[in-house]
Image: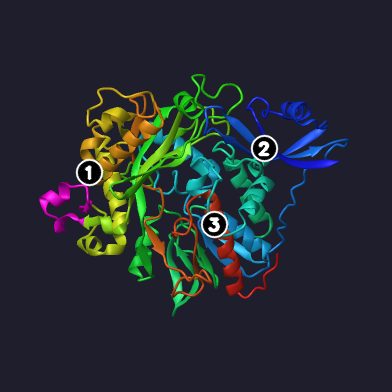
Amino acid sequence: MIHELQVRLSPREAFDERGIISYLRREQGIRADAVRVLRRSIDARQRTVYVNLSLRVFVGERPQEAVIEPVHYPDVSGARPVIVVGAGPGGLFAALRLIELGLRPIVVERGKDVRERKRDLARIRPEQCVDPESNYSFGEGGAGAYSDGKLYTRSKKRGDCEKVLRVFVQHGANPNILVDAHPHIGTDCLPRVIENMRRTILSCGGEVHFRTRMTSIIIHGDEVQGIRCQDGREFRARAVVLATGHSARDVYRYLHSRHIEMEAKGLAIGVRLEHPANLIDCIQYHSPDGRGQWLPAAEYSMVRQAAGRGVYSFCMCPGGVVVPAASGAEQIVVNGMSPSSRGGQWSNSGMVVEIRPEDIVPASLLTPSEAKGSDVLPLSPAPATASPDDMADDILRPLLLQEQLERLCWLQGNRRQTAPSQRMADFVNSRLSATLNPTSYAPGLIASPLHFWLPPFITTRLQEAFRAFGRAYRGFLTNEANMIAIETRTSAPLRILRQRDTLQHVRIRGLFPCGEGAGYAGGIVSAAVDGELCAAMAAQYAGTSLRG
């Protein structure tokens, strides 16, 4: 006999099958022989922490081994090609979906494969510089490969999120991601999964070209014909899935120069906030003992309105590390990631302020008092990035603001990858930090008055929100936490306009802007879903009947 039921257990009871079966026999009177967890979530809203479980309970029989129906990927070596630019989550899932539908993906990636890329990341600390083509943003797996591997998304109505998780498991991810409410692969495991996806693409007859940066799109009339790359090669196809990620600023500038329609998009900018992991565990689990033996490292999600703009936590990494995520010279950008165990001694999250395009105003148009106020963000020309024509262009202003603040942060960091930092309570009280806490950020920190040089638009709203978070979560506002600048890459600064029904660009036929870089996704799963959707439309456009 098989039962399905919902139960609410203590963390110790929910830790393994033996504890669950003991609970069912003692409290429910069910003499279970085995259980299978279908869904698991932690409820820490009250002082007593519980684990909510959806179970399949087997009485008088043993369960068969759980089988995940694999996606079938046929041989497409002789099929019609579709070009996929970018090997991040959007591009990889677009390529796999194209194979499902009987087309041959040609994947073009400016960076290196995930193994070589890892070596370049390791050199950032000793050399204090970033390879502009192989970094935390560019390379196989995209920014998602080294940004914690979280697979939680709220955009579940746009596509088949469960299928995305099954494809990850099919390529080597832990099956627990099919069960957990907030699934997570971990940056130590995700590269192997990404390599397996590439092997699937190649074994089915697709192509993957690394160190191949697209420099232009071949367009005849208003129809795509293919792409050109920096090494002089051309790839020809009737459809191009453009999945270049939110940091490919050269692509945005190229599209803008060709008058390929885009629009400015809202974004969020702030800092990485790093606490001791045990402190976050104690706060979130309402216990001086922290997580104890049975619970995972604690997560949090915080949001607050401050002076008419949202301030919120972003990409929370329990038991994780802060990493240098710049993608070019004269930049400091920080991000966070966690290993699968989430066992590190620090926890971090982005703490960012909502910015709308109309908030960004060229400094030349402001009076001195307006420029010093907190109602707008003054935009000043940055060397080698912003021309007067750029400054006058509303579309590019969010991108230019990112560049301006990243360069300012680099200058504050002594023109290295040492990140400017300030203790959290000192920042809120506008005090200098004489010393800083230990940190996971490998290139090192330098004490800096963030409250003084960050734009007042950001500073005043962070200070207000931190005070509110400190009142709501006692102990959260503390000098035991470091604020590390600067977090700018929460999302794309621009949106490449596309048709709602066909997902093609609004004017260029055969061009399918895809994923986070195109402004239509916000994380690994949503980018993967968008990749699948764009691939299906590209297949339809390329004249192949859909299957599967």
Q: Which residues are magenta?
A: 362-382
Residue 388 % position (x, y): 20, 61
Earlier in the chain: of badge 1 and badge 3, it is 3
Residue 423 at least partly seen: no
* Residue 428 vertical position relative to residue 191 in the rendered view, above or below: above
Residue 296 % position (x, y): 57, 29
Quarter the C terminus occupies:
bottom right
Q: Which is more foreground, mark 3 or mark 2?
A: 2
Q: CA distance from mark 1 to mark 2?
A: 46 Å
| Residue 91 marker | 3
Q: CA distance from mark 1 to mark 3?
A: 38 Å
* Nearer to me, 85 or 68: 68
Secondary element at image label 1: helix
- Residue at 79% x, 28% y: name it: 25
Secondary element at image label 2: strand
- Residue at 53% x, 51% y: name it: 154
Which residue in the protein does label 2 denote? 53
Q: CA distance from mark 3 to mark 2?
A: 34 Å
| Residue 456 marker | 1
**Residue located farthest toward the top when viewing the structure as drawn:** 289
* Nearer to me, 341 or 330: 341
**Residue located farthest toward the left when viewing the structure as drawn:** 368
Q: Amino acid at mark 2?
A: Leu
**Residue located farthest toward the right when viewing the structure as drawn:** 60
Residue 310 % position (x, y): 35, 48
Q: Amino acid at mark 1?
A: Pro
Residue 26 at least partly seen: yes
Secondary element at image label 3: helix
Earlier in the chain: of badge 3 and badge 2, it is 2
Q: Amino acid at mark 3?
A: Gly
Q: Are marks 1 and 3 in contact (CB under 8 Å)?
A: no
Residue 333 % position (x, y): 36, 42
